Amino acid sequence: MISREEIAHIAELASLKLTEEEKEEFSEQLSDVLNYINKILEVDTEGVEPTYYPLPSSNILREDEVTNQDRRQEMLEQAPDKEDDQFKVPGIEQKE
């Protein structure tokens, strides 16, 4: 079982603040996940071909088509805020 101390360490690495109740809950949940993974690892997969997708599939993507349309003005007309023929977006706050 994953201990509460290990959960607290993981939370600290992820910059998360957890209550004692959350540490206990996550300890149980993560232990359940790891136990399930161990069960999966016990399955004999000898002779099983690896698959990336369980169902047959074919290329469902469309072909790329090159267009030389200049739609800049059309897109700028839809912009909520623009300045000098450019999109205007909010600035990013700098952390000090």
Image (tube, rainbow, N blue to C red):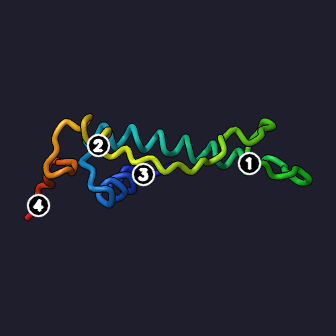
Left or right position of 68 against 51: left
In the rendered structure, find residue 94 and report the number of the disc placed on it: 4
Distance between mark 3 and mark 4 Cα atoms: 38 Å
Distance between mark 2 and mark 4 Cα atoms: 32 Å
Q: Are marks 3 and 4 in contact (CB under 8 Å)?
A: no
In the rendered structure, find residue 52 and report the number of the disc placed on it: 1
Extreme right residue here? 47
Which of discs 3 and 2 lies nearer the camera? The answer is 2
Q: Residues within 10 Å of mark 3 (few under 14, many from 20)?
A: some
Residue type beneath disc 2 = Gln
Q: Position of residue 12 (x, y in %)?
A: 29, 58
In what element is the residue under mark 3?
loop
Q: Which residue is mark 3?
A: 3
- Which numbered disc, 1 or 3, marks the residue that appears first in the sequence? 3
In the rendered structure, find residue 73 and report the number of the disc placed on it: 2
Extreme bottom residue here? 96
Distance between mark 4 and mark 1 Cα atoms: 43 Å
Which of discs 1 and 3 lies nearer the camera? The answer is 1
Distance between mark 1 and mark 2 Cα atoms: 43 Å
In what element is the residue under mark 1?
loop
Extreme left residue here? 96
